[in-house]
């Protein structure tokens, strides 16, 4: 099924690129986090602490629970952070339309997506078909 995306989002994607980060990543719910540890993401809210980190860091965590899947991390280097209307929606829709789940993290200057490790080649092909350049 061919999808139609907004011209603005596709223009923004054409000016953007992506990198597939090395390593495999896991999602974990932990009881505490060493403030000096190096993890991709630590998120705290009233209910829990979530850590996204590489597999080799798993043993260093005070683990409560972990997601069973292993993920790959892709950085989306967007041309105009904060003002790219439809950018993430287009990326997520294209991946979801292929029957895959996508997890999203946005930082000040980049967006990141995570997909199951066994789906990284399919995800790469989808990003290229949208008009991204691979860095």
Image (spheres, rainbow, N blue to C red):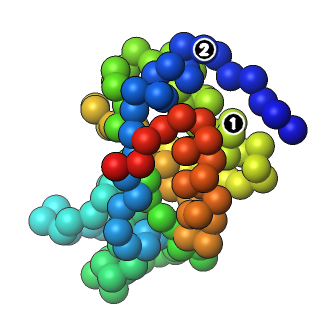
Decide if residue 76 is on the left or right side of residue 120.
left
Q: Mark 2 points at which residue?
A: 7
Question: Given this view, does label 2 or label 1 mark the residue nearer the observer?
Answer: 2
Residue 100 in percent (x, y) is at: 71, 55
Residue that sits furthest to the left in the current view: 36
- Judge by depth and name the residue closer to the eye, 65 or 54: 54
According to the picture, the residue beneath numbered tag 1 turns out to be 93
Q: Residue furthest right?
A: 1
- Callout 2 crowding tier (Cα within 10 Å): few <14, some 14–19, many ≥20: few
Query: Which secondary structure, mark 2?
Result: helix
Q: In this view, does 70 lie above or below 95?
A: below
Crowd class of label 1 (few under 14; some 14 to 19; many from 20; radius 10 Å): some
Indicate whether 35 appears above or below 15: below
Q: Where is residue 92 in the image (x, y as percent from the top left)?
A: 62, 39
Residue plotted at (33% across, 82% down): 56
- Give above or below for 34 relative to 103: below
Indicate the quadrant where residue 36 lies.
Answer: bottom left
Q: Residue visible at 47% across and 28% down? A: 14
Query: Residue 75's x, y, as percent?
Result: 38, 48
Q: Which residue is drawn at 55% across and 54% down?
A: 124
Quarter of the image where one finds residue 82:
top left
Q: In this view, does 123 lie above or below 78?
A: below
Residue in the foreground of this view, choosing between 69 and 36: 69
The residue at the far bottom in this view is: 59
Q: Specify which label sits upstream in the sequence, 2 or 1.
A: 2
- The residue nearer to you, when weighing 134 against 41, is 134
The image shows residue 132 at horizontal and vertical percentages of 48, 38
**Residue 134 can be seen in this image:** yes
């Amino acid at each position: 099924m061919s999808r139609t995306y907004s011209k603005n989002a596709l223009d923004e994607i054409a000016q953007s690129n992506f990198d597939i980060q090395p390593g495999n990543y896991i999602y974990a719910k932990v009881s505490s986090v060493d403030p000096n540890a190096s993890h991709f993401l630590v998120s705290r809210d009233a209910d829990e602490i979530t850590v996204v980190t590489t597999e080799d860091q798993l043993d260093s965590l005070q683990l409560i629970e972990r997601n069973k899947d292993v993920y790959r991390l892709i950085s989306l280097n967007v041309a105009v952070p904060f003002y790219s209307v439809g950018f993430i929606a287009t990326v997520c829709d294209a991946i979801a339309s292929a029957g895959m789940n996508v997890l999203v993290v946005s930082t000040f200057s980049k967006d990141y997506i995570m997909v199951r490790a066994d789906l990284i080649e399919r995800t790469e092909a989808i990003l290229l078909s949208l008009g991204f350049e691979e860095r």
